[in-house]
Image (cartoon, rainbow, N blue to C red):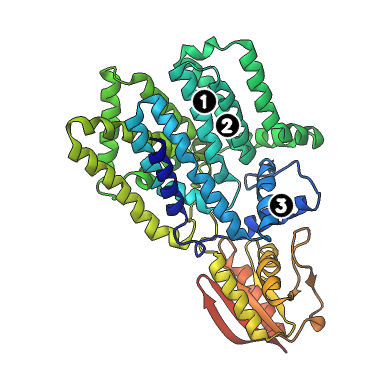
Amino acid sequence: MWKIITLLFLLAVSIRLLYFPDNVYFAYDLARDSYTSLEILEGDLKIIGPPSFAGNNLFAGPLVFYLYAPIYFLFDKNPEALSIFLRVINALGIFVVYFIAKNIFNKNTAFVASLLYAFSYEQTQYSLFISHQPLAVLPVLIFYLGLVLLIFKNKSSGIFLVAAGAGFAIQFHYIYSYLIATFVLSLSISRKIKSLVGKHLIFASSIFLLTISTYIISEFKFGFRTIFSLVESGKASTGLHFKESLFIFERLVKDNLISDDHIFPAVVIILIAVCGYLVFRRKAVQQMKFLLMWIAISFTPYLFSGTPSYYYLAGTNVALLIFVSFLIANLRKKYFLLSLFLTLAVIYNNISKITTVNPRGVNQYMVIQPEMLTREEKKVLDYIYQEAGNEKFGVKALTVPFNINTTWSYIFEWYGERKYGYLPTWVGPIAEGYSGIKAQNDRSKIPKTQFLIVEPASGIRQGIIDNFFKEENYFTKIIEERSFGSLTVQKRERF
């Protein structure tokens, strides 16, 4: 079986590398974190991670920077090399999925679950996004493997996987603190956990505290600002978001089982009916409780936030895939053709979404600006440098966030300077305090030939965009305009 699972792992890697490097996404958040990782290589160690959109004082852990740094050191700051690393990391989850399903049910269920994970569209999306949130998939799965060993195999060593999985998941996003509540809730599912002796709990607590130690240090250093911010966020909550949570559930089923809107209601009814039947007939009751808990508790962040993003569901689709795999494996005994049809139907649904969406990179629920791909960004730079003809030139950009040149600075330094040997003059003004090429605000000192890069302006008010172009037209005139995917470049000359 090991050989088969290894082959499935290689299949999973191949699926996640489809369309590489053409679908490598690179925008502001990634450029920002890449600069921070390079600072670590220069000896500037970090104890806080990337900031959260949920609040100014909310940050993830810094572990992501320490993972990026050696990849950038070995591969000359190349985000495409980093993308390969993240895709392989996601594919490694196939081994953890196998052991989870095997210890909950049996080898047959574990094989089917691993197969479905290999073809999982949702997991390929996690693997394509170079950011800290998707890295939580593997530690979340390790956390649940530890719970499975505790609950279903009565192995005390599972507590160490629980502690390490939860700690590392929290490193990648503080929201995964809900895994602590998951562990506590598990106490009501299995009395076996209560048999843990003190030394196991002490050692596990030490592992957990070590993995989240950066949070502890930063809280003391910065006056417990994260705790206070979370409390304030809770007070500012606008209530429970049931409608948004139902949308997340619908997307979970559609992205993993069936996308057809006409069939979707029937699929949900069948899943609920089968689950109810198993519980009513007292078949696999404990297993059903565990999988339902896994799915249900993962929805609590959406219930309170209402955000449509993927971030909080890392690994949750595995619970759904294991449940479906259990049904398929049991049908195989008497209804082989039906079990084969269901397997192929799920795989077809995922392949269809992979071949439709993945060529364009990560989807709209992952990022603000879909289709900001290195493929097109490199074409933009090639066009600019070739049009400049080895002469100095100026560059300005309509960026998201507005007036922050971090994204294009990184691309010019990584790709442009390496290939063409020099950097442009950046046309100011730009916002202060962000990494990137320093701006020149004196227009008289900027080369006559200039280029204006226009990103997809998601989230920027039209009035701001109109004023941006109005101001630019005062200083320069358009000579030529070219489009590269979702990006536009205007070649301009100073009056």
Mark 2 or mark 1: whose residue is earlier in sequence: 1
Disc 2 to disc 1: CB gap under 8 Å: yes
Disc 3 to disc 1: CB gap under 8 Å: no
Decide which of 488, 1 is in the foreground and name it.
Answer: 1
Q: Is residue 315 above or below residue 462?
A: above
Q: Which residue is mark 1?
A: 146
Residue at 33% across, 37% down: 112
- Please provide percent x and percent y for residue 39: 77, 53
| Residue 468 in the figure: left or right of residue 292 | right
How far apart in space, not on screen, are marks 3 and 1 (Cα)?
A: 31 Å
Q: What amino acid type is highlighted by mark number 1?
A: Gly
Q: Quadrant of residue 170?
A: top right
Label 3 packing within 10 angstroms: few (<14), some (14-19), many (20+): many
Residue 165 — which label?
A: 2
How far apart in space, not on screen, are marks 3 and 2 (Cα)?
A: 23 Å
Residue 37 — which label?
A: 3
Q: Quadrant of the C terminus?
A: bottom right
Residue at 68% across, 56% down: 74
